[in-house]
Amino acid sequence: MSASPVQRQIVSSQAIPTRRVLLNDPSQLPHDYSTTPGGTLFSTTPGGTRIVYERHFLMQCRNSPLAKSPPPNLPKIPGVTTVQEEKGELMKENGMGKEERSGKENANHKETSGDEPQFHMDI
Amino acid sequence: MDNNTFKARLKNEEDSGEDENGEQKNKESRPVVKPGKGEHPLQFNYCFWFSRRTPGKQTSSSSYDQNLKNIGTFASVEQFFANYSHIARPGDLSGHSDYHLFKEGVRPMWEDDANKNGGKWIVRLKKGLASRCWENLVFAMIGEQFMVGEEICGAVISIRYQEDILSLWNRTAHDQQTTSRIRDTLKRILNLPPNTIMEYKKHSESLSDNSSFRNTSVFMR
């Protein structure tokens, strides 16, 4: 019994891409059974090629040189992209350096560098 | 899934396909933003927007549009940080201000084609929490943590006098499976206490009562 032409085409397709995800705690498991840890729903990702980044990984990218230089065409908006002319002030706004300053927000809760477990909120 | 949703998704897939071929439509004659060499591409390109209400006059739709300032577009994790690290943290903004982070091509307006059938989840925050919550939401959105296909349109942090308000906009307000999945993911990534009140509002209702955060549907769990 030989396979039909259609079946032969399917056989010569690519390998299924896989990705390993390390879980340190049962709480990191997805909340529903149809989701794989760190993965995506098959039904929403034909081909399964959605680009997913975890918080931890994003924080690591924050330190790359390109991530640290401002975009070339950043518009000047007072109080938003241009803070006072103090040296270094602008560079720190959303960046890593901010935590070392005595930020206004640090008064009520401890600011963290982001790798710690997320804070508990009192809303 | 109804027909319209399906078409919208198909359209989106075509768009991202064009991205890969470097032939993306250049709708507003801005340069096409692409990930640089060695950078980590994102599933979608996004735009940062900023708006601040001008004192005095009540905002109509057209003045809202005029107040919207495009800060920058990014296509990779590195480009995201280049923008994000050089704008003020939302908690440090003054007055009646909003940051909007939307997929490229979607304007942060109720009337936009991507938004007109949509709605948003609203989380009200005590003063002092805005910067941290915004960061968690933005990281989850660009990192594709919501797992609802093409449904997410964008996120907004609204700095107000008494409280700050986080919103997450999606494409199809009547798709309950999607909206509850978004709500659950929001709770997880923001680490919201179990009794947090979540509110949902359709943009069509915002258009008819001309209000972003009043007359919402309240959900508790």
Image (cartoon, rainbow, N blue to C red):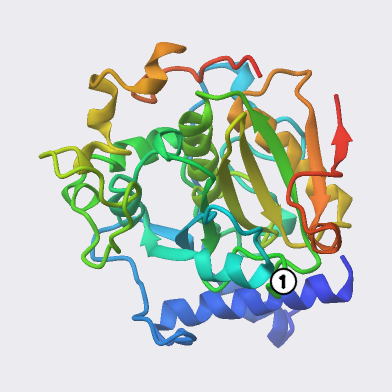
- Residue located beneath label 1 in the image: B111
Which residue shows up at 50% across the image and 23% down it? B128
Q: Which quadrant would residue A91 be assigned to in this image?
A: top left
Q: Quadrant of the C terminus of chain A?
A: top right
Regarding residue B147, the answer to whether it shows in the image is no
Q: Which quadrant would residue B75 be assigned to in this image?
A: bottom left
Chain for disc number 1: B
> Residue B26 appears at what percent x and percent y?
44, 86
Residue type at mark 1: give it: Glu
Q: Quadrant of the N terminus of chain A?
A: bottom right
Between A105 and B18, the residue placed more toward the observer is A105
Q: Is residue A30 left or right of residue B119?
A: left
Between A6 and B38, the residue placed more toward the observer is B38
> Residue A79 appears at what percent x and percent y?
33, 46
Regarding residue B5, the answer to whether it shows in the image is yes
At label 1, counting other C-alpha atoms closer than 10 Å, the crowd grade (few under 14, some 14-19, many 20 or more) is some
Which residue shows up at 52% across the image and 25% down it? B129
Placement of B45 over or under B168, stated as above or below? below
Which residue shows up at 56% across the image and 44% down it? B157
Q: Secondary structure at mark 1?
A: loop
> Residue B168 appears at what percent x and percent y?
66, 48
Placement of A20 over or under A102, stated as above or below? below
